[in-house]
Image (spheres, grey):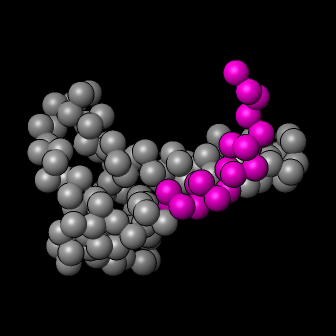
Amino acid sequence: MFGSSMPAYHIWLILMYFVPLSISIAIQGTEDFELALALGLFTSLMNDVFYFVAGDLLFGFHQNLIDWWLGQFGFKGYKVLFTFNGGIIHFPVYSWLMGLSIYSRIIAVVLLSERWLYNLPKL
């Protein structure tokens, strides 16, 4: 939670969402690639939605969560939330862009995991 100043921080963060799932791809092949991709996107989504919740609980960040969530879900328009650090690529992440990213990942997770959601055993 404190390493955001390292070079290419956001690239490493994205890769870390998928590293645990790549093991299953390596062992089982690409048959469940969609599920692995959905789980990686879901992990990144949980990080973006609950980062400061965990920070408040574990480290006492004392962030105003409602205000922060308004920014995360795109309700603060062109307010810059942070700067994307992709090594040689840097750009401001506006609230609307973060919201678009969150909503896009929700849709992608649902679509990618649809096959597994409909094949769950009946209780």
Residue 89 sits in quarter: bottom left
| Quadrant, the N terminus | top left
- Horizontal and vertical percent position of residue 86: 44, 69
Dominant SS in magenta = helix
Q: Nearer the viewer, residue 57 or 23?
A: 57
- Could you tell whether 5 is left or right of 100 in the image? left
Regarding residue 22, the answer to whether it shows in the image is no
- Could you tell whether 29 is left or right of 35 in the image? right
Q: How many labels does the image show?
A: 0
Q: Which residue lies furthest to the front in this view?
A: 123
- Horizontal and vertical percent position of residue 94: 26, 73
Q: Is residue 111 magenta?
A: yes
- Could you tell whether 21 is left or right of 2 in the image? right
- Could you tell whether 48 is left or right of 92 in the image? right
Vertical arrangement, residue 95 with respect to residue 65, above or below: below
Regarding residue 45, the answer to whether it shows in the image is yes
Residue 99 sits in quarter: bottom left
Q: Which of 52 and 69 is in front in this view?
A: 69
Q: Which residue lies furthest to the top in this view?
A: 123
Rendered residue at 87%/42% (across/down): 28
Rendered residue at 23%/53% (across/down): 69
- Horizontal and vertical percent position of residue 17: 55, 48
Chain part drawn in magenta:
105-123
- Horizontal and vertical percent position of residue 66: 16, 48
Q: Is residue 24 magenta?
A: no
| Quadrant, the C terminus | top right
Rendered residue at 76%/28% (across/down): 121
Rendered residue at 74%/27% (across/down): 122
